Amino acid sequence: MREFSDNMTSLVSYPTRWNQCGDARYRGNCDGRLFLGLVLRYRPGSVGDPMMGSGTTRDVVDWLNRKSGASIRYWGDDLHGGFNLLKQDLPDRFDLVWVHPPYWDIIRYGEHPDDLSNTADYAAFREALRVCLRRCMAALNPGGRLAVLVGDVRRRGSYIPIVRDVLNLEGELGQLRSVIIKAQHNCRSDRVQYAPLEDVPIQHEYCVVFKRNQPLRALRNAA
Ligand SMILES: C[S@@+](CC[C@H](N)C(=O)[O-])C[C@H]1O[C@@H](n2cnc3c(N)ncnc32)[C@H](O)[C@@H]1O
């Protein structure tokens, strides 16, 4: 496992796919190595993922538990599995919560009105994301970490820095501890031939890590 943990810095890039975890056919599925790096660094006893999509984090935890004999407890769900982060609290407390929300409507995940990829305008998305992230933070054990994987969007000539709105939640969400830049590879948009763009294409996303240091009660009714 050393090859995954020792060299992780604030800049990560995985040009070749790691097919052990998740389902690459699920749009927006993420490579499990960044999440694995965080687990190896923070050594959580428990992990939650309320937007698990194809189950990348579940598979990483299973893999790690098998390989290392660890017994990390895992809970994950998704709107597709019946769990609605906009309306429901996570069912337990965790040392690490990983959340990988839709990047607004860049990929549509479904027609459910509470699907974050289904919000009509950016202001509504930003508010829904805030509610979801506060719920995630409220599910952390004191000293726990919230890792948010998020990317920016370009829409009709405007650059929408979703990461700025996540970073602006510092304080509300806990203490900002890391911003990791992750290169994006093998995106479906890479294969589309666009007319020459006026601005440079986006080929990175961010993993923003907050640490919870407020008392539990202050966050319990956060959302
Ligand atoms: C970017 S994908 C996550 C992909 C996942 N990390 C993987 O590797 O497969 C975002 C997920 O958020 C889910 N989602 C959107 N709105 C939600 C909500 N209100 N509650 C729970 N999940 C939601 C979508 O169904 C989708 O699976």
Image (cartoon, rainbow, N blue to C red):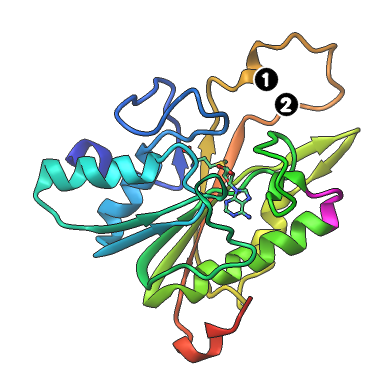
- Residues under labels 2 and 1: Cα distance? 10 Å
- Nearest the eye: 104 or 84: 84
Q: Is residue 51 left or right of residue 108?
A: left
Mark 2 and mark 1 residues within 8 Å of each other at the beta carbon? yes
Tell me: is circle 1 under 8 Å from ligand 1: no
Label 1: element kind: helix
Task: Determine which residue is flagged by label 2.
Answer: 201
Q: Is residue 28 magenta?
A: no
Residue 70 can be seen in this image: yes
Tell me residue 181's x, y (percent): 53, 43
Q: Is residue 95 above or below residue 54?
A: below
Q: Which mark is residue 189?
A: 1
The N terminus: image quadrant? top left
Magenta segment: 119-123
Please count the marks in the image.
2
Q: Is residue 41 above or below residue 135?
A: above
